[in-house]
Image (cartoon, rainbow, N blue to C red):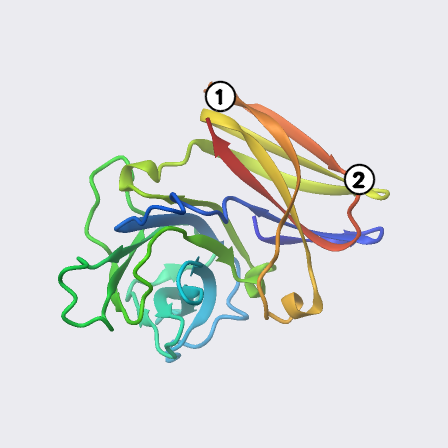
Amino acid sequence: MNKIVKKISSIAIALIIGMSLLIGDQDHAESKLYASFTMSITDLNDVPDHDSERGENLIRLEFPKGKEPFYLNVVTRRGKQSNTFQLGIRGTRSNKAIFCGTNLSVNSTYTIAFSIENRNEHDRRDEKNSAIAKLWINPDFDAPECTENLLQRVKEFPFSLTEMILHVAPRFSSQAYIYNERTASEWGLMALPVELVSFSATAKGKNVELKWNTATEVNNYGFEIERSVVSDRHLQGDGYFSWTKIGFVEGNGTTNAPKLYSFVDASASGKVLYRLKQIDR
């Protein structure tokens, strides 16, 4: 959850739940990778007008392998109707995004899926159109892969699909919930292994107590707890968070019973963010 919690004592807390992680074998390139996240935008203060061609970054997907890191951005702009917004895809070196015409409503929850696919390496008649990016809104991961809501050909994409990392744009940390981030190498693996009900943080003196609840779990090995320090650059919407693992809590494997978890951070100071990284067995 990307929601700023009011400052208590000397600690300001924000929460990010989900997975900003690496997917795949670092020594083995995939032909296609997927990512998904759940989102809800609560207001449109930082969302540009409908005529914006660039949009504002919501999620950044990083592909670190190659001569230099390459990024794709899931971006947003205002929709055609009041209190609506649209999603699009923009490449690293592009000032223009391709937008989906679907108007999404403020304060509604959506599941967004994304894929990036390399073209056949033996059929690169135009190497500047080397990959295809797709975006889905509220897809069914239990059914076969369906027709996308948006498709864009990506220029100058690095051909090695070995790693993909998700970053939530810091500008939206106070006006959007973005959680349940997940990456996979197959469409059918996008279904979440853990159904998260809540995630909260409370400052108690110099400590911060984290609590979270799950409704169901499938092959859940446990949760890594990660922390990031918020700088002035982040508050101004510039820069991306650097995360440090501060602990681990064992999961309950496979269960349909609600479970409560907790963790105490005894070394927090200043303005900090927390996130959970769920790990399968």
Q: 68 or 270, which is in the foreground?
A: 68
Q: Amino acid at mark 2?
A: Ala
Residue 177: x and y in percent read 53, 52
Which residue position is annotated with label 2? 266
Is 192 located above or below residue 79 in the figure? above
Horizontal and vertical percent position of residue 11: 79, 52
Q: Height in image: 59 above or below 97?
A: above
- Residue 23 seen in this snapshot: yes
Numbered mark located on residue 253 in the image: 1
Local secondary structure at mark 2 = loop
Viewer-nearest residue: 111 or 227? 227
Residue at 66% of width from left, 67% of height from top?
235
Q: Residue at x 42, y 73 (%)?
A: 55
> Which of 204/251 is in front?
251
Residue placed most toward the observer, 105 or 17: 17
The residues bearing labels 2 and 1 have C-alpha atoms spaced at a distance of 27 Å
